Image (cartoon, rainbow, N blue to C red):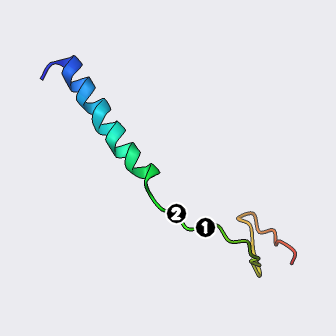
Amino acid sequence: MSSPNRTAMLLLAFLFASLSAFAADYPEPKQGSWVAHDFRFHTGEVFPV
């Protein structure tokens, strides 16, 4: 396969693969609360609750 044809085929393959991501049905976001109890940073600091 020549270089321009290969480039065009790769571009079309990427286009078709990326279009499928737009068709996905993502769940509706929900608002809520979450508490991280006893959270520690890698430096050893503790996040106050």
Mark 1 residue crowding within 10 angstroms, few (<14) / some (14–19) / many (20+):
few
Relative image position of residue 28 (x, y in whole percent): 60, 67
Question: Taking 6 as reference, is 24 left or right?
Answer: right
Residue 5, labelled with which disc?
none
The quadrant holding residue 40 is bottom right
Relative image position of residue 41 (x, y in whole percent): 74, 66
What distance separates the C-alpha of mark 2 from that of mark 1?
7 Å
Residue at the image position 77 percent from the left and 78 percent from the top = 35
| In the rendered image, the vertical position of residue 27 relative to residue 22, given as above or below | below
| In the rendered image, the vertical position of residue 11 relative to residue 32, given as above or below | above
Relative image position of residue 11 (x, y in whole percent): 31, 30
Question: Taking 8 as reference, is 33 left or right?
Answer: right
Q: Which residue is mark 2?
A: 26
As drawn, the residue found furthest toward the left would be 1
Residue at the image position 77 percent from the left and 80 percent from the top = 38
Instruction: Identify the secondary structure beneath mark 1.
Output: loop
> Are the two marked residues, 2 and 1, in contact with CB atoms closer than 8 angstroms?
yes
As drawn, the residue found furthest toward the bottom would be 37
Say what amino acid the circle numbered 2 marks: Tyr
Closer-to-camera residue (6/26): 26
| Image quarter in which the N terminus is found | top left
Residue at the image position 29 percent from the left and 33 percent from the top = 12
Q: Which residue is mark 1?
A: 28
| In the rendered image, the vertical position of residue 17 relative to residue 32, given as above or below | above
Total marks drawn? 2
The quadrant holding residue 36 is bottom right
| In the rendered image, the vertical position of residue 5 relative to residue 47, given as above or below | above
Residue at the image position 86 percent from the left and 78 percent from the top = 49
Question: Taking 45 as reference, is 25 left or right?
Answer: left
Instruction: Identify the secondary structure beneath mark 2.
Output: loop
Say what amino acid the circle numbered 1 marks: Glu
